[in-house]
Image (cartoon, rainbow, N blue to C red):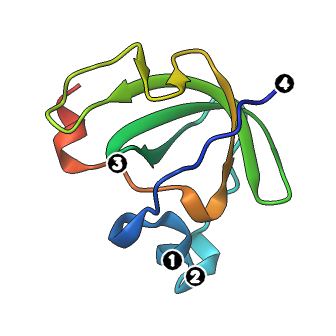
Amino acid sequence: MHKHVEWDAPGGASVDAHYAKDEQHRVEPQPGMILTARYHGATARIQVEAYKDGVSIGKVAALIGDGGERHDSLGDLSLGDMVRLPDDKRAFQSPRDEDD
């Protein structure tokens, strides 16, 4: 069963909005890929297990706070939770997350 998640809006880091201008470079998520979304102001990384009709399904692989700190859980979301991530909620990785 998937956990229902209210993802934060990706704002200026929106993958969907970026590729709306450049469809030829849009990549459909594949199993094993890691996607990024925003949740409660933090970064959530999702490892894709399946993709259908504009929604990725996968497990939460990482939760990274604003200051770069890692969490086992945040709000109602925990590492390992199975979630659905719609394309319009996907975000580009924040530069501050690249120091992992």
Quadrant of the frame with the N terminus: top right
Residue matched to label 1:
17
Of 46 and 22, the residue lying toward us? 46
In the visual, does 57 lie left or right of 93?
Answer: right
Residue 75 visible? The answer is: yes
Residue matched to label 2:
20
Around disc 2, counting alpha carbons within 10 Å, would you say few (fewer than 14), some (14 to 19), or many (20 or more)? few
Q: Secondary structure at mark 1?
A: helix
Among the two numbered marks 2 and 4 on one chain, the one whose residue lies closer to the N terminus = 4
What is the CA distance from the residue labelled 1 to the residue labelled 3?
A: 15 Å
Contact between marks 2 and 4 (CB within 8 A): the answer is no
Among the two numbered marks 1 and 4 on one chain, the one whose residue lies closer to the N terminus = 4
Q: Secondary structure at mark 4?
A: loop
Dot 2 amino acid type: Ala
Quadrant of the frame with the C terminus: top left
Dot 3 amino acid type: Gln
Is 16 situated above or below 94?
Answer: below
Around disc 3, counting alpha carbons within 10 Å, would you say few (fewer than 14), some (14 to 19), or many (20 or more)? some
Residue matched to label 3:
93
Please name the residue shown 45% across and 67% down the image: 14
Residue 37: image location, x then y, percent: 47, 47
Among the two numbered marks 3 and 2 on one chain, the one whose residue lies closer to the N terminus = 2
Please name the residue shown 75% across and 52% down the image: 55
Residue matched to label 4:
1
